[in-house]
Amino acid sequence: MAKKSSAKTQVIAAENMPAKVSENRCKFTLYNLAGQEKDFYLVDRHSLQFPPEDQLKKGVAHNIIIVDRSGSMYYDIKALKEMLVKLLTLDEYQNFELLVSLISYSSSGDVICHFERVPVVEVMKPQSRYLAEVKKIESTGSTCISQGLKMAVSLVKEGEVTGITLHTDGYANDPSFNVEVKTLEELCRQLQGKDVFLNTISYGYADFQLLSKLANLVSGVCLKAGNVKEVYDALYSTSSLLGGSVKPAIEEPLIKEYDYQVFVSKSAKKILGSSSTLKICGLKPEDEGVFYKYRKVSKDEYEKLDVPVVQTSEILFAFAKANLADGNLNTAKYALASTFDATLTEKHSKALTNAQIADWTQDLEAVIFNPDLLKSHEVLSGVKVNDKVTILELVKVLEENAEGIILNLKHLQQNYRRRGVKRIEGVRDKEGNLTTPWLKMEYIDGGEYVRMGSFSINQNTATINMLVTRKVRLVKVEDETPITEVAGVLVNDLSSFNNYTVVSDGELNVKTLKVKFSQKKAFEALKKLGVLDGEEFDFRREYEVMLENLPLVSFTGRYSVPVGVFEELAKIKVLASVFAAHLKEQSEDFTGEQIEELKQHYLSKSLYINFPTTTEYKDLKAAINEGSIDSRVSYKIDVGSKEILNLGKLYSANKFLDRLYEVSDQDTGEKIDKPGFDLAMDKRLNFEHKKLSSRTKITKVDDLMKAIFDDFLGLENSGVVAEILGKVGADNTVRVLEAKRKGDAVSRDEFVAALTEGNKKLEGYAEQVYGEQVSPLVFYVGSTGLIPDELEAKGLTADEISGKYPDLNLSKDEREGMFFEVGDCVLSVYAKNEYYSTR
């Protein structure tokens, strides 16, 4: 039977919809997405009360507009400038006693204040220099938001109400994402408690999560710019609010009895949450509002409380919205599920990306400000659990049945969204001129249908790639002559390999796959999962495999990292690196002369086609400025130990050889200045430990690698190499290495064959360990941005983890990450900038 989304109970009819909560005290249960009880809450409700003495209008109001002029705003900047000019020249602005400041920013250090604290009547004058300043703004550079907000903070004065509107379409990533986030949050804290509110406007692929959090910190709202009118309305709303009568900022403390509070004002369109004092600005005298105070209680205490139970209510929708803006994604999802609103839960339960969270935010605001919308929703008396097959499970079944499935490649290419930088074949010289290969690839198949590809999960991101193999041949560009033989090898039946990223950093890139089935068992396997648009097998027809509404990961799954898994992977990587260094220019099948001729025809010794590639653009900065290249944040998740943070800390085999060992020619005694394991294929080498200088610091990485090197080089006889190879089943490699250690005759071909076999077994075993034991956890963390509840791992900063485990060596990117102890391992999560082509 196919899995289907299930609910614990039936739909509540519209006429039986829960009434608006009017009680001052109530309670609710917080469920997780699997429908399991997680926490219990008591809620107290208090209406907004302005202090009696606070009835005076503010004499001065200040509107600060901060504009993103980075290269990625290339397509939006013209419309934004026209909108600002239109807004600032409206007739009704004459009634506003308003000061206006305009700031623009792009790369770090190039913030500009175009004009400061200018009365709006001066800005509006025909041919004013202030309007000219607006019109001359041009897009260029990267995105350093903090400098714009920092300048705005410096313009805020006591005794006047200030509204700040921040525009951006990118990620705050210059000089780095984490530095920007910390700086922006600190600037927002400086504004809290003052007569200031911050509205943020998100364009395109902007970091909506961050913008929403900043707005929440400074009593504002975050708007996703769907169209020009919405942006205009938001700007006008801020200006008209400031031009009228505005109450001073108010503070609502949160006493120790409570864990969280949310303020909701439907008239002011504000929903603000905090686990401490709430500071609210931007309210008119006629605005109404309510504070919800949330206290977590035990199940026993909850059951004894004689107060109404509310689930589908403003109390929970507001709790979800505030936690979402506050960055508490897991709590927000649990709160949404606990409303029993199946329509919204099914739509947003897997929201991870900024675009998805922006849509989710808009839907939450809509139902809070207009509760009648619930009448059109499917509302249950329990959590609707999405127990459909996960994407991870689906790709496994697709791969297992690949022999019986063919894929519509044209449909995939037409509906595929690229997440990286587009590359073209060729190389560029210093001037940027492109030289293309003298050969090209010609597909032998028709190009419409191909065999279903194989799938792999990235080892440190929430990414799933599908590798599609196609038959090709090489053809001369000059005269279209096919190449049939190279170095005595027939090359008229080669294969090309193209990777399509099905999931990228937790975001689905492909909504559907169109396929045909040649085997009924393959059809039945997919039908059983409930992902096909047909019930009967027909080898003639095309079916759609529907991916869009499937969960990426299971919320009922259990995730862990087995004890000792990192050390095992580290040892395998070190030994594989040693083998690969020996085999760099070696082949079981070809001579050095043959390998060189294959290279001239862009072929590897494994007969893979390796055309050189480069980017479409000549200059990255110019591409960013014109908007053809933008950047996004990708979260990297690495598994390490309490001594070595990740596998990236290991040295390459040749670099480590040069670091700790002296290498000389046995026959001549000559010392080799730049030793490499490839030399061992042609010379008899002697290895000794180096006499290290006092400046050389021996680390835990050195200790781990030295034990393996000493055993492999014959300086020790610990048996560690045989132990590693025995675990992966490379018995023949163990036999050959042991014979070589004893001085027995081992031919060059036999040695190359043994190392080749050993390397394949090592890499295959490592892939299996990752696929079964590590990648599922990495994918979960990268997909959700959360550590599984069952791990109960507390996040540590770089300083905290380094203080506990001083042997860890953190890079610049890693120092801005978060770290979690999971058993004997350390899980590190950090952000990195990734460039992608916008068209």
Image (tube, rainbow, N blue to C red):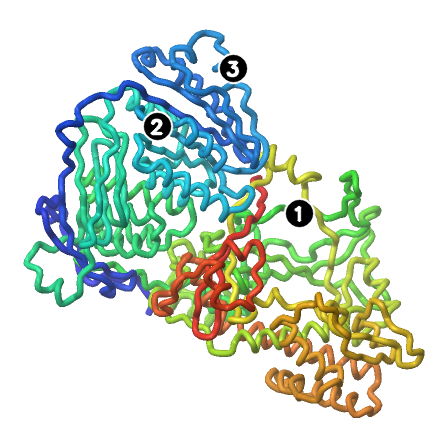
The amino acid sitting under disc 1 is: Arg
Q: Nearer the viewer, residue 538 or 224?
A: 224
- Residue corresponding to mark 1: 423
Q: Nearer the viewer, residue 109 or 727?
A: 109
Residue 14 % position (x, y): 14, 46
Mark 1 vs mark 2: in front: 2
Say which mark, if any, is on residue 163: 2
The amino acid sitting under disc 3 is: Ala
The amino acid sitting under disc 2 is: Gly
Report the side of 267 relative to 416 (left or right).
Answer: left
Q: CA distance from mark 1 to mark 2?
A: 44 Å
Q: Residues within 10 Å of mark 1 (few under 14, many from 20)?
A: few
Residue that extends furthest to the front in the rendered view of this protein: 694
Report the side of 16 relative to 449 (left or right).
Answer: left
Q: Earlier in the sequence, mark 1 or mark 2?
A: 2
Q: Does residue 531 lie above or below 224 as drawn?
A: below
Is label 2 in a helix, a strand or a loop? strand
Mark 3 vs mark 2: in front: 2
Q: Residues within 10 Å of mark 2 (few under 14, many from 20)?
A: many
Q: Residues within 10 Å of mark 3 (few under 14, many from 20)?
A: few
- Residue corresponding to mark 3: 132
Residue shown at 57% from the left, 39% from the top: 839
Residue 342 % position (x, y): 25, 53
